[in-house]
Image (spheres, rainbow, N blue to C red):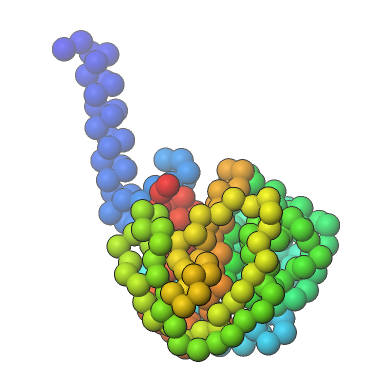
Amino acid sequence: MSKRVFTVLAAGLALSLMCSAAFSAGCCVAKSAAACPASAVTRVLFMVGGGIHDDKELPQLLEKVLEDTKQFDITITQDRDQFKAENVGKYDVVMIYTTGGNLSPEQEQGLVKFVENGGGLVGIHSATDSFKNSDAYWKLMYGRFRGHGSGTFQVRITGKRHPIVEGMTDFEITDETYQHNWHPDSKAIVLMRRVEDGDPASWVQYVGNGRVFTTGLGHGKPAWTNPTFQKMIERALLWADFRLNP
């Protein structure tokens, strides 16, 4: 065996061992090898506040659940200027649980470009009832809130090959039954539907080089303490940060 061939094989083996170690640490797939050291965590900007969805207990509850996995570093804020380009680039994923409000042109552009350039976006529940002055934001969300009922209902997993829901089974949740108007230019893949009416409950989009997950679930504490809801958000954040593929 020539010295050149031996060197190439040795380098390949070293890279394989590095990837195996990263996988074992929970970093399944990264945007690049350099982006996935064994100690990597997903940096999450968690935008909250507004209207009836301003319960400080819920974001802090989810923050603890996520940070206990040792996979996330969560920053909770109500400052929408964090969407501006000079700020949002410090994060891997933006997660939104807000109601109402507007986006300035700079905030809108920063968020859209962040996603198009490879950032992740996760919208929870009333994220689809936010920033209605922005058509670009509606397109990112795919759904725009138009009404709801409430109760305890069944959710069916429909996109079973997608890594966010792979291996999950249908489940019951006590929550609001969000209905939406759908953006005509969005291209979403539905992962979950409510059994009673067939409406989408969770979906994903691939936008530019980035990824977007949105769910209509998540109104109050009964939903946020549901283990399947918590696991869904955990996987959605990992997927949005390219740590689950495709």
Res 173 quadrant in image? bottom left
Give the percent coordinates (x, y) of residue 122. Answer: 56, 63
Q: Nearer the viewer, residue 135 or 185?
A: 185
Give the percent coordinates (x, y) of residue 73. Answer: 50, 66
Q: Which residue is at 77% across, 58% downward? A: 135
Q: Nearer the viewer, residue 27 or 245?
A: 245
Res 33 quadrant in image? top left
Q: Quadrant of the N terminus?
A: top left
Q: Which residue is at 71% across, 59% downward? A: 137
Q: Which residue is at 44% across, 83% downward? A: 153
Give the percent coordinates (x, y) of residue 139. Answer: 68, 56
Give the residue furthest to the left. 1
Q: Which residue is at 33% across, 67% downward? A: 168
Give the residue furthest to the top. 2
**Image height of 69 relative to 114, above or below:** below
Q: Does residue 12 appear in this view?
A: yes
Please give left or right for residue 226 compared with residue 136 in the image.
left
**Image height of 2 relative to 212, above or below:** above
